Amino acid sequence: MNKKVVFVLGIGRSGSTLLNYILGSHPDCFDLNEISKLPEIYQNRQRHQDFWEGPGKFWEEKFNPEEIKMLIAGLSNHRINPSIPLKIERLVRETVGNDQILNPYSLMFSKLDKQVLIDSSKYVDWVSKKLQAKEFRSGQIDGYLIHLIRDGRAVLNSYLRWDKNMTVEDFSKRWSTLMKEDQKYFEQFPSERKMLVRYEELASEPEATIQKICKMLGIEFQAEMLEYWKYDHLGITGNFGTRSLIAKYKGQETESKVEKVHGNYYEKQGFKIKLDLRWKNELDSEKIEQFYSLTNSLNKSYEWD
């Protein structure tokens, strides 16, 4: 069976951390989380010292210093040689058979005894560029796409709760642009290697939803993977609330920002996957009307009532 990379596509606050953790709890899978952010974290090590003293230790234990540099270069989408455009360097390296640095997923597979990697970096620009690499074009690795969607009202409410400087206008412009971009890319992707997943279905019917994804990936569903908090995860970044259940299960202190932003919501939730519909009580009608007006009612097809 070919190795597989599952790219999760979608806007933030739509359940990508939850999906990433559930799939990553399968013994054949490894969740990379938002691996696109690793180069910045690596290059600004001082600023991210907590990461390197925690989950970041994994990378230094699995990869030697030269391999880490190669991995970061392959993930960064930046020129390897400052004087040579990346497109030209890729062509030359592929021609002479010296393109390992441009195939980061192959490098990660070589260090991990896994069949499937889950990349929840989310953005079209990232996914499209990664799939241009020879490791995918040659058929060595199969790329899969999960478009994760959520009612825009819930996403808006989550962003407003998290970022007090966010306005409905700013969010609406960003949300509308990304949703159209994601939909266009998803429609063009090979049908046998893609799936549309609703956050609301994932959270309310996790077993049925994950069974469908496992079937597409050719791996056996295991009920234990739904209890993602029992497993270790890299946690490069992602939803702090979803991550808090892992800390709670391990008897660790929950990050202070979880309570600051969410109050006791996750404390009351307990160890279970729960559909988050807080927007119905927290988002006022004026903001909803403004959101629909600014997005030409694009959310109609994403509504979950």
Image: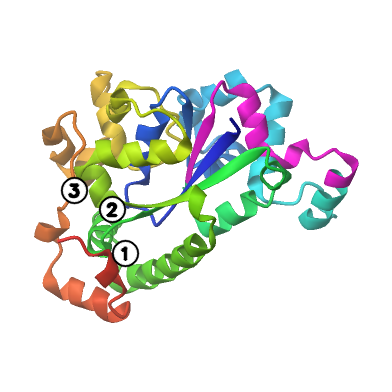
As measured in the structure, the alpha-carbon distance from the residue carrying label 2 to the one carrying label 3 is 15 Å
**For the point 31% across and 79% down, which residue is it?**
294
Q: Is residue 95 magenta?
A: yes
Is residue 241 visible to the viewer in this orientation of the structure?
A: no
State the image coordinates of residue 292 (x, y, percent, origin top left).
25, 76
Q: Quadrant of the N terminus?
A: top right
- Report the residue marked by disc 2: 162
- Report the residue marked by disc 1: 166
Callout 2: SS? helix
Is residue 248 visible to the viewer in this orientation of the structure?
A: yes
Q: Choose mark 3 or mark 1, whichever is in front.
A: 3
State the image coordinates of residue 99 (x, y, percent, origin top left).
80, 40
As measured in the structure, the alpha-carbon distance from the residue carrying label 2 to the one carrying label 1 is 9 Å
Callout 3: SS? loop
Q: Is residue 237 magenta?
A: no
Q: Which residues are magenta?
A: 94-120
Question: Can you say whether 145 is above or below 253 in the image?
Answer: below
Disc 2 marks which amino acid?
Answer: Trp
